[in-house]
Amino acid sequence: MFRLTPTVKNLLIINVIVFALQTFLAGTNLTELMAMYRIGSVYFKPYQFFTYMFAHAGFTHILFNMLGLVFLGVSLEMVWGGKKFLAFYVITGMGAGILYALIGFADTYGLKNDIRHYSVSPSYEAFAELIDDNKEKFDNIRFNGEHTTIWDFLDAYDKDREGYRQRSVQLVSEVEDLFITKYPGRVIGASGAIYAVLMAFGLLFPDRQLMLLFPPIPIKAKYLVLILGGMAVFMEMQRNPGDNVAHLVHLGGMFVGFIMVKFF
């Protein structure tokens, strides 16, 4: 019979209790308090690097994370002991969150500087350059009224440069609020720590057979690490607007987990 080790059992209980509280206290801001937000956002607090990994977005989210914890974490705890496994779990979870936050900060730092410079010296040419340098952000902007996209606004700006100069300053200020100051960039879930556990399992037991759930076929641990890691890289590069999964957290967890197993 499959038996849980103490630390894995306690982590499982904590995550389930927190999820139950999220569900029954859905009318409160418990999830918002625990979630990790983008650095620079008014919602960001340093403690979120720890709390985000114990909150989840739904039943499927927590189910698969806890399955990973149970089926992979027990073997690691049996080898390392409870204290070392707990330290590994917490450090890699926090490390994944910190890496994600730093990458997000670097991603918006350039945009923030570009916006500040434009606000000081606005012109059509500078606005066109600002958009061109930050296409990914501005492409997501939609207007109500006379303009549909940012490119429609740019065309109108070109035809009436004096009339649109101040409107463009207001627009870039709204973009700063949208993507930096007031943009939550919220992340929750134990996935960073779980992907670290997966990495550690693949390094310690590379040839151990694991049974997938979908499809139910056996696969060696080392190949599962490569497949899931490759999928995370691919999905992050795609950056599908409808994809609300923080793939960088997964990759961050795998990276921190690799470093810890190899060097600590």
Image (cartoon, grey):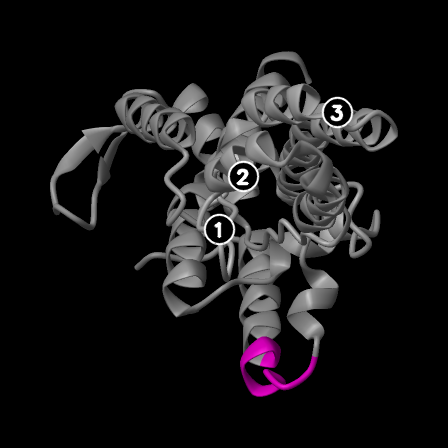
Looking at the rendered image, the disc whose residue lies closer to the viewer, 2 or 3, is: 2
- Tag on residue 228? none
Query: How far separated are the C-alphas under marks 2 and 3?
Result: 21 Å
Residue 165 painted magenta: no
- Quarter occupied by residue 234: top left
- Say whether residue 214 is left or right of residue 112: left
Which type of secondary structure does the marked residue at label 2 adopt? helix
Circle 2 Cα neighbour tier, 10 Å, few/some/many (<14 / 14–19 / ≥20): some
Q: Which residues are magenta?
A: 21-28
Residue 90 in picture, x, y percent from top left: 68, 43
The amino acid type, in three-letter code, at marker 2 is: Ala
Vertical position of residue 9 compared to residue 129: above or below: below
The amino acid type, in three-letter code, at marker 1 is: His
Asked if one can make out residue 77 in the rendered structure from this viewpoint, the answer is: no
Q: What residue would you read off at disc 1?
A: 147
Q: How many marks?
A: 3
Q: What residue would you read off at disc 3?
A: 114
> Is there a contact, CB below 8 Å, between mark 2 and mark 1?
yes
The amino acid type, in three-letter code, at marker 3 is: Asp
Q: What residue would you read off at disc 2?
A: 156
- Say whether residue 126 is left or right of residue 61: right
Q: Which residue is at a point 66% across and 39% down the rendered structure image?
A: 97
Vertical position of residue 113 compared to residue 150: above or below: above
Q: Earlier in the sequence, mark 2 or mark 3?
A: 3
Q: Which residue is at a point 52% across and 53% down the rendered structure image?
A: 5
Q: Earlier in the sequence, mark 2 or mark 1?
A: 1
Which type of secondary structure does the marked residue at label 3 adopt? helix
**Quadrant location, the N terminus:** bottom left
